[in-house]
Image: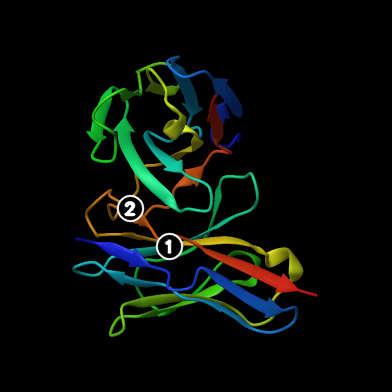
Amino acid sequence: NAGVMQNPRHLVRRRGQEARLRCSPMKGHSHVYWYRQLPEEGLKFMVYLQKENIIDESGMPKERFSAEFPKEGPSILRIQQVVRGDSAAYFCASSPIKFPQGSYEQYFGPGTRLTVT
Amino acid sequence: AQSVAQPEDQVNVAEGNPLTVKCTYSVSGNPYLFWYVQYPNRGLQFLLKYITGDNLVKGSYGFEAEFNKSQTSFHLKKPSALVSDSALYFCAVRPRGNNDMRFGAGTRLTVKP
């Protein structure tokens, strides 16, 4: 059973370009979460999605960032017109539906390290 | 607002000695509590969780954590540290009936031979 897959593992973009980060959850998992981690810092929640539905995007910057989890295919985190401050590690996690609600742990992918030059 | 505090940025212990990594939280109700470990250039790995029942929870790699409701703490412990335990440790909290999980800032554990 493959774990959470993320690609690419490393991504270099010039300022103003678009970055697309992909996440394939573990088999059987219907919930996907995106986090950002700056060097020597903890994880900051960005967005929580189920298939075709954004549940909570309270951690997403209002501009340039968007996320989707289509019916088929991986979840995508898109950053438009990247700036140097977007350089960070972006982690995806997935979880199953488990009751009681909220009692499940999340399984993390290896992350995508974005560098904006 | 809910929050998670890991009061120590860094913890240093000698191999073979017991270790404790502290976590306190401020969340209404009885939240679910988690510990994760992150090795360099890797994603987070789940260690253990507290859902209900016994206050002492046992997890992976010999780690355990003690839930203390009155002190709203969930400290991570291990009786005998290994050099390979050196990593970044994160405490996380999720309110019951909620999908919103919040992580602490992390504690870097260094175990010296």
Q: Secondary structure at mark 2?
A: loop
User: In the shown orientation, is residue A18 left or right of residue A57?
Assistant: right
How are the colours assigned in the image?
Answer: rainbow
User: In the shown orientation, is residue B101 left or right of residue A40?
Assistant: left
Name the image quarter holding the C terminus of chain B.
Answer: bottom right
Q: State the residue at coordinates (43%, 34%).
A: A85
Q: Tell me where residue B51 appears, x and y as whole percent.
A: 36, 66
Label 1 sits on residue: B34
A92 up-or-down from B6: above or below: above
Please tell me if label 1 and label 2 are on a single chain.
Answer: yes
- The first of marks 1 and 2 along the sequence is 1
B86 up-or-down from A87: above or below: below
Q: Tell me where residue B70 appears, x and y as whole percent.
A: 28, 85
Q: Residues within 10 Å of mark 2 (few under 14, many from 20)?
A: many
Q: Tell me where residue A77 appears, x and y as whole percent.
A: 40, 25
User: Which mark is drawn over residue B101?
Assistant: 2
The amino acid sitting under disc 2 is Met
Of B64 and B73, which appears nearest the observer?
Answer: B73
Rounded to the nearest angstrom, the CA distance separating label 1 from label 2 is 10 Å
Q: State the residue at coordinates (22%, 55%).
A: B97
User: Which mark is drawn over residue A62?
Assistant: none
Of B56 and A110, which appears nearest the observer?
Answer: A110
